[in-house]
């Protein structure tokens, strides 16, 4: 993985000193709340319902064991010995003390980490495919380009006060595992007719209260022009994005109001005149970045059948929590952060330390964070799988539910967030308890359930096969259900299938939806494919057919 | 009382005097010739919604462009300064003005081409000067400045 050089380290250290000074001035009363707000947000520090919340950047979701151990140590020293992994591959601390945040940042800097631009109206942490470098379908490893984008966007002088936040995701494989179509800019690594590597560029995707799918603004962008082209997009956005209405300020509204054709023309015109003074990527820089992401020193091993004499528990775990690796003899292992009774994405300090230890023993000392709020050990020898499973099971991290209904994405909701309408974590617990029968879960098969506690859609509910949105009705928590959303393979937004339901009835409604699916599906057809084939109509008609209380 | 902080290089180049007339971009563009009789040059005030490219053809008559930062979230002025310096080659003073001109933003402003800062009333001149030195490095190519080493990405123009 990437290693900081003296420039990277100096910038992060200088940032720590700057934020220490800003915090001191705020606590002394020299900086007003209004003036401090944008400064702390640029360091990922929110003032939340009960305490500040600190969002630590995990660039493109990649962690070394020393970094994961430092995160464990920080949660013990400054917080309540746990952290929460988010849909943008970051880690959130829910209980830090404002006065100690500079110390937390200083500790992070010792392991080449930071919280730079994890909030605020600037270019945010660049996210990517959690299977980068190990997936068999990959065209090219996206992480070198993510790292170059991280550096380029860090303290970009011109784009620090954009109309609204700006999120970039990069994918190097045809199967989009990074939800690139719902980002402000989505980048797909592609090759042109001549075999040169470049990017397909999408713009204007996003969730929030007005979800939109990104559109192609350029089919092929040569590698060297990556940064200057994005600067042209950002310059247009900085100038013409709306600043009068926060709900219309994301770039998707600018793209929509101009139309993609006119937007494309303006970007090209801006780019042609500005590229000479904007950042260019040289082949040497690209090669240097790529040198940090070379394949590990894999052994030459055959693929072997690990299931012949294994017990049923291991078989279930193998089937659901591991994936094929591009190298023979290896397997990709998911660490499930979705056991019953735990808020999805939460992990204790002890678990972090133990997973770091395990990663050192079986997976080249690297850990990945997924946008679905799990971790991945990317490079496990098949002969180490049993040992890995035993280790994870002891830690409560081997729940065999990856890709199933209970592997749900859930925002922190009312328990922590000051924007939320609804206690999403309670609903998650309700669903975990209601759907605790593995035979049933496995029969339902691959399905993505995503839940947000408010319109801001941090839980990606619009692109859940089943989406759940918490709404406030006269001070009570209700939940609106959508079906048919997806953030991969032709992204789509979910359809509302009926009136919202009170909290206590969410699991029962989901079960009814699944009943309709089980009746209508063809053989092994996935839920999303059934919904796409039959439309949402049969679900609308039958899920709400009669009063729930009478059911 | 105005507190104007100038970069050393700008002060050395000869800053506009305190009595220079500063008018809005609309006023200036309505009748640019009126302000340039006998080689006189004016100051032009650019608001966030102005089109800075409209000034491009008239910059010879302009000694100072004052770019407004009315509130903490307003970011268009950063782009205007870069365009003036790098696309239109403006050599005069670019001054940040308005209530949001505070020490924690100055580093970004400098890198976009500002060389003078009309600081908000609550700002301390000495602290603001120190704030300019918080970062000694930067990744991106921008308006060159001696105190900042541009460490990584370069513009095409610089490699020719």
Image (cartoon, coloured by chain):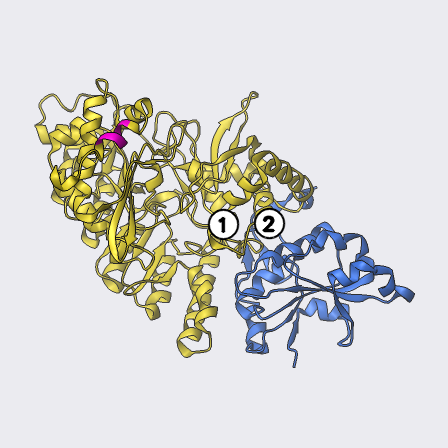
Chain colours: A yellow, B blue
Cα distance in 3D space between marks 2 and 1: 12 Å
Label 2: how many Cα within 10 Å (few below 14, some 14–19, many 20+): some
Q: Which residue in the protein does label 2 denote?
A: A240
Does A255 appear in magenta? Answer: no
Q: Is residue A299 something that shows in the picture?
A: no
- In the image, taking residue B23 as reference, residue B154 lies left or right, namely left
- Where does the image place residue A205, in percent across and percent down from the top left? 46, 39
Q: Residue at x 69, y 42 (%)?
A: A273
Is residue A491 shown above or below B75? above
Label 1: how many Cα within 10 Å (few below 14, some 14–19, many 20+): some
Q: Residue at x 57, y 58 (%)?
A: B75
- Examine the image and state in which quarter residue A515 appears: top left
- Examine the image and state in which quarter residue A391 appears: top left
Is residue A432 shown above or below A516? below
Element at badge 2? Answer: helix
* Quarter of the image with the C terminus of chain A in it: top left
Observer-side mark, 2 or 1, equals 1
Which residue is more in the foreground, A385 or A438? A438
- Where does the image place residue B13, in percent across and percent down from the top left? 76, 67
How many labels, in total? 2
Q: Which mark is residue A248?
A: 1
Is residue B85 shown above or below A263? below
- Where does the image place residue A326, in percent across and percent down from the top left? 33, 26
Chain under numbered label 1: A
Element at badge 1? Answer: helix
Q: Which residues are magenta?
A: A538-542
- Examine the image and state in which quarter residue A292 appears: top left
Q: Residue at x 55, y 61 (%)?
A: B136
């Amino acid at each position: 993985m990437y290693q900081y050089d003296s420039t990277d380290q100096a910038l992060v250290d200088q940032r720590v000193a700057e934020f220490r000074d800003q915090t001191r001035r705020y606590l002394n009363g020299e900086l007003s709340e209004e003036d401090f707000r944008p400064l702390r947000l640029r360091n990922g520090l929110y003032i939340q319902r009960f305490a500040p919340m600190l969002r630590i950047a995990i660039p493109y979701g990649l962690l070394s064991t020393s970094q994961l151990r430092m995160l464990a140590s920080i949660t013990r020293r400054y917080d309540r010995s746990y952290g929460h992994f988010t849909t943008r591959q970051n880690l959130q601390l829910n209980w830090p003390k404002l006065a100690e945040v500079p110390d937390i940042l200083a500790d992070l800097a010792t392991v080449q980490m930071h919280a730079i631009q994890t909030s605020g109206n600037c270019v945010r942490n660049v996210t990517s495919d959690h299977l980068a470098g190990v997936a068999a379908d990959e065209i090219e490893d996206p992480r070198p380009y993510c790292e170059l984008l991280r550096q380029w966007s860090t303290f970009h002088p011109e784009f620090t006060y954009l109309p609204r936040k700006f999120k970039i995701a990069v994918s190097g494989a045809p199967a989009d595992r990074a939800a690139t179509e719902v980002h402000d800019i989505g980048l797909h690594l592609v090759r042109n007719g001549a075999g040169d590597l470049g990017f397909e560029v999408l713009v204007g995707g996003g969730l929030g209260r007005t979800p939109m799918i990104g559109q192609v603004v350029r089919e092929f962008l040569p590698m060297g022009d990556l940064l200057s082209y994005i600067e042209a997009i950002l310059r247009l956005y900085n100038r013409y994005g709306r600043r009068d209405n926060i709900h219309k300020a994301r770039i998707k509204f600018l793209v929509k109001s101009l139309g993609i054709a006119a937007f494309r023309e303006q970007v090209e015109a801006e780019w042609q005149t500005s590229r000479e003074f904007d950042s260019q990527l040289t082949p040497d820089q690209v090669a240097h970045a790529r040198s940090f992401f070379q394949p590990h020193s894999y052994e030459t091993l055959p693929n072997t059948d690990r299931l012949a004499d294994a017990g049923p528990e291991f078989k279930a775990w193998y089937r659901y929590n591991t994936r094929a690796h591009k190298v023979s003899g290896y397997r990709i292992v998911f660490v499930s952060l979705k056991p019953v009774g735990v808020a999805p994405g939460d992990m204790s300090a002890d678990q972090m330390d133990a997973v770091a230890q395990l990663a050192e023993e079986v997976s080249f000392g690297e850990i990945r964070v997924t946008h679905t709020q799990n971790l991945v050990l990317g490079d496990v020898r098949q002969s180490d799988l049993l040992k890995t499973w035993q280790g994870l099971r002891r830690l409560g991290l081997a729940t065999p539910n990856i890709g199933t209904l209970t592997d749900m994405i859930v925002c922190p909701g009312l328990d922590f967030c000051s924007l939320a309408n609804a206690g999403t974590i309670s609903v998650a617990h309700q669903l975990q308890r209601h759907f605790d029968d593995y035979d049933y879960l496995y029969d339902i098969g691959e399905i993505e359930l995503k839940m947000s506690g408010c319109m801001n859609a941090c839980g990606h509910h619009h692109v859940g096969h089943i989406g759940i949105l918490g709404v406030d009705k006269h001070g009570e928590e209700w939940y609106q259900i959508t079906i048919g959303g997806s953030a991969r393979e032709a992204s789509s937004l979910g359809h509302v299938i009926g009136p919202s339901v009170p909290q206590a009835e969410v699991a029962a409604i989901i079960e009814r939806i699944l009943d309709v699916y089980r009746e209508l599906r063809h053989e092994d057809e996935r839920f999303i494919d059934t919904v796409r084939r039959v439309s949402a109509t049969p679900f609308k008609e039958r899920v709400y057919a009669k009063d729930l209380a009478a059911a | 009382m105005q507190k104007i902080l100038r970069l050393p290089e700008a002060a050395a180049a000869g800053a506009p005097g305190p009595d220079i007339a500063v008018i809005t971009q609309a006023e200036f563009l309505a009748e640019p010739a009126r302000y340039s009789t006998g080689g006189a040059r004016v100051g032009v005030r650019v608001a966030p919604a102005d089109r800075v490219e409209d000034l491009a053809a008239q910059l010879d008559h302009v000694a100072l462009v004052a770019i407004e930062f009315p509130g903490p979230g307003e970011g268009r002025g950063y782009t205007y300064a870069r365009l003036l310096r790098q696309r239109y080659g403006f050599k005069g003073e670019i001054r940040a003005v308005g209530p949001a001109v505070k020490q924690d933003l100055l580093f970004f402003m400098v890198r976009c081409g500002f060389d003078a800062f009309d600081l908000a009333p609550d700002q301390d001149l000495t602290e603001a000067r120190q704030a300019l030195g918080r970062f000694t490095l930067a990744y991106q190519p921008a308006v060159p400045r001696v105190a900042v080493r541009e460490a990584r990405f370069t513009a095409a123009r610089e490699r020719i």
